[in-house]
Image (cartoon, rainbow, N blue to C red):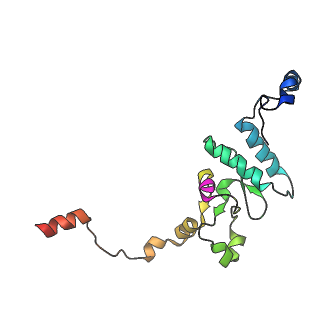
């Protein structure tokens, strides 16, 4: 869906026409972000998931996070900070979680979702329930090297 004006012969021949109409020679990151924002603003969109994921991969490769939106299982594009990555497939077993959280679409890889700011569900639930206070620390309390040094003395 992206071409440089140098790649296709008919674009090369009409370069002066394209530039006079304000069309640039190549696509920039800002153009891709504007495509995502435009699709996000539409009501009841059949999301072109593969296109959105391709744009997100390109943005990640370029190290650009600003303006990104992630597709969700509900068919919407949402700010990554408002999404949750189902890293343990809990939403399949517990349907009530889908009412509480906006889950990232399964076509979006975990690495891609986390890069843009989606929070894994396991971390979100663990912080909400304060799991560290529920467990007692077990096992050795000193470093292994210190313990071996004390044994060998």
Given the current orientation, which residue lies at the most extreme front position? Answer: 9
Residue 12 in the image, given as x and y percentages of width and height: 83, 26
Which of 31 and 1 lies nearest the eye of the viewer?
A: 1
Q: Which range of residues does the magenta coloring cover?
A: 108-114
Residue 77 in the image, given as x and y percentages of width and height: 76, 55
**Along the horizontal axis of the image, is 153 left or right of 78?**
left
**Along the horizontal axis of the image, is 133 left or right of 84?**
left
Residue at screen point 66% across, 73% down: 91
Q: Quadrant of the N terminus?
A: top right
- Magenta stretch: dominant SS? helix
Residue 134, image quadrant: bottom left
Residue at screen point 63% across, 67% down: 86
Q: Is residue 11 above or below residue 116?
A: above
Residue at screen point 34% across, 76% down: 138
Residue 30 in the image, given as x and y percentages of width and height: 72, 37
Residue 123, image quadrant: bottom right
Which of 142 and 8 lies nearest the eye of the viewer?
A: 8
Specify whether residue 135 is painted magenta.
Answer: no
Residue 74 in the image, given as x and y percentages of width and height: 77, 64
Q: Quadrant of the C terminus?
A: bottom left
Given the current orientation, which residue lies at the most extreme bottom position? Answer: 93
Total numbered circles? 0
Specify whether residue 112 is painted magenta.
Answer: yes
**Along the horizontal axis of the image, is 143 left or right of 110?**
left
Residue at screen point 56% across, 68% down: 122
**Along the horizontal axis of the image, is 116 left or right of 41?**
left
């Amino acid at each position: 869906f992206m071409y440089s004006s140098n790649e296709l012969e008919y674009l090369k021949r009409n370069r002066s026409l394209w530039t006079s109409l304000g069309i640039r020679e190549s696509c920039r990151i800002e153009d891709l972000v504007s495509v995502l924002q435009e699709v996000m603003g539409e009501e009841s969109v059949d999301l072109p998931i593969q296109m959105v994921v391709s744009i997100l991969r390109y943005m990640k490769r370029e190290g650009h996070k600003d303006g990104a939106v992630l597709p969700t299982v509900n068919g919407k594009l949402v700010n990554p900070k408002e999404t949750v990555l189902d890293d343990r497939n809990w939403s399949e077993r517990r349907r009530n979680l889908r009412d509480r959280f906006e889950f990232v679409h399964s076509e979006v890889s975990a690495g891609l979702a986390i890069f843009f700011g989606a929070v894994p569900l396991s971390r979100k639930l663990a912080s909400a329930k304060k799991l560290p206070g529920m467990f007692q620390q077990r096992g050795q309390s000193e470093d292994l090297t210190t313990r071996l040094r004390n044994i060998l003395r």
